[in-house]
């Protein structure tokens, strides 16, 4: 995981590290009471994760274009 996102921020790398456990929690939540609450939490995590990914990717892309 470190090599894949080496140039990304620590914040994004932390979110990427947590993606596996969050997916597992979402899968297991189908069997639990109050599963809707857990799935809502997972959905919020996904929105934060993908928004951060887009912002970081755009930031690196703009930086690379300016470097050329």
Image: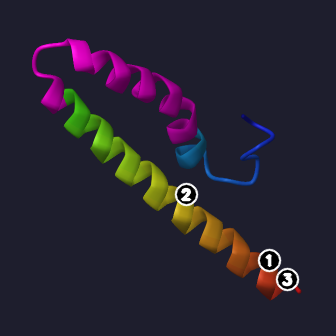
Q: Earlier in the sequence, mark 3 or mark 2?
A: 2
Q: Residue at x 38, y 52 (%)?
A: 48
Q: Where is residue 57, by image quadrant?
A: bottom right
Query: In front: 26, or 41?
Result: 26
Alpha carbon separation for disc pair 3 and 2: 21 Å
Q: Position of residue 44 (x, y in %)?
A: 29, 46
Q: Residue at x 52, y 27 (%)?
A: 20
Query: In front: 12, or 47?
Result: 47
Q: Please tell me how crowded label 1 is: few (under 14), some (14-19), or many (20+) other residues with Cα within 10 Å.
A: few
Q: What is the secondary structure assignment of the residue under circle 2?
A: helix
Q: Which residue is mark 3?
A: 67
Query: In front: 25, or 27?
Result: 27
Q: Where is residue 43, by image quadrant?
A: top left
Viewport quadrant of the N terminus: top right
| Depicted 55 relative to depicted 46: above or below | below
Q: Earlier in the sequence, mark 1 or mark 2?
A: 2
Q: Is residue 31 left or right of residue 8?
A: left
Q: Give, as a single range, the part of the protein colored magenta.
A: 14-37
Viewer-side label of 3, 2? 2
Q: Position of residue 39 (x, y in %)?
A: 24, 33
Q: Residue at x 54, y 65 (%)?
A: 54
Viewer-side label of 1, 2? 2
- The numbered disc on residue 3 is none
Alpha carbon separation for disc pair 1 and 2: 16 Å
- The numbered disc on residue 53 is 2
Q: Position of residue 11 (x, y in %)?
A: 53, 46
- The numbered disc on residue 64 is 1
**In the image, farthest residue toward the right:** 68
Q: What is the secondary structure assignment of the residue under circle 3?
A: helix
Residue 2 shown in magenta: no
């Amino acid at each position: 995981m470190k090599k894949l996102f080496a140039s990304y921020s620590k914040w994004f790398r932390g979110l990427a590290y947590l993606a596996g456990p969050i997916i597992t929690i979402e899968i297991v939540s189908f069997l639990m009471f109050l599963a809707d609450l857990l799935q809502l939490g997972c959905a919020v995590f996904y929105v934060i994760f993908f928004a951060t990914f887009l912002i970081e990717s755009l930031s690196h892309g703009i930086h690379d274009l300016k470097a050329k």
